[in-house]
Amino acid sequence: LEMRSENFAKAKTLISEGLTKDKTQGSGWLVAAQIEERLGNEGLVELILKRGLECAPYSAELYCALAEFNIQRGKIQIARTLLEKGLEVDPSHAPLYHSLAELEARVFNIEGLAQLNKRAAEIFNTNALEPPPASMKLLSQKLRASSPAMKKIPTVVAALTKMVEIEFDLDETVTEMMDP
């Protein structure tokens, strides 16, 4: 609230008190870094994020934030190392995969992207290059269930198919229409 109202002095006081009581919460360090960033204290941002990782070494968000800080300064290898370390700490933290994929794409590391895709597929039981087969069917079911107009489609389609005397599988057709 203090940050929204741009009362940074009060925000710094509050987050300092919070971090004094519990230094192990990565979110506190992120807020402290955001305050300094809004104040234009770039050097302090990096120091706060590094100190945050010392106190909260299992915070995937801190690894991600410090990596992003380094990317903005062109320190690609440092950022990559931080993102990799974050994935070691929390292999199921999807934003780390996303940030690392963006980094690898930025430097045109196709091999690195392929390896990251394989790694993510092992963790999340999916392949980013192929949509899961059930996802489109589930989406069509959700669309049908959520929209009054969609609920009428089976009745309308059934009437139309009787008129033209063909067999029609609504689930399959909606899935095909929704599949890119």
Image: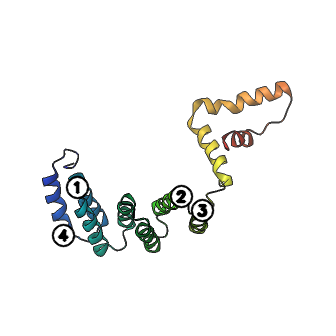
Q: Residues within 10 Å of mark 2 (few under 14, many from 20)?
A: few
Quadrant containing the C terminus is: top right
Please state which of residues 82 and 26 is positioned toward the viewer in this rendering: 82
Q: Position of residue 124 (x, y in %)?
A: 57, 64
From the viewer's perspective, tell me whether residue 81 is left or right of residue 56: right
Q: Position of residue 72 (x, y in %)?
A: 37, 57
Amino acid on which the number 1 mark rests in the picture? Ile
Please state which of residues 10 and 110 is positioned toward the viewer in this rendering: 110
SS at badge 1:
helix
Amino acid on which the number 4 mark rests in the picture? Lys
Task: Tell me the distance, in whole angstroms, between the alpha carbons under discs 3 and 2.
Answer: 7 Å
SS at badge 2:
helix
Q: Residue at x 60, y 39 (%)?
A: 143
From the viewer's perspective, tell me whether residue 48 is left or right of residue 144: left
Give whichever of discs 2 and 4 has the lower sequence position.
4
Task: Tell me the distance, in whole angstroms, between the alpha carbons under discs 4 and 3.
Answer: 45 Å
Q: Which residue is mark 2?
A: 105
Q: Residue at x 70, y 33 (%)?
A: 154
Which circle marks residue 110 in the picture? 3
Task: Tell me the distance, in whole angstroms, between the alpha carbons under discs 4 and 1.
Answer: 19 Å
Vertical placement of residue 53 versus 136, above or below: below
Q: Position of residue 165 (x, y in %)?
A: 86, 29
Q: Residues within 10 Å of mark 4 (few under 14, many from 20)?
A: few
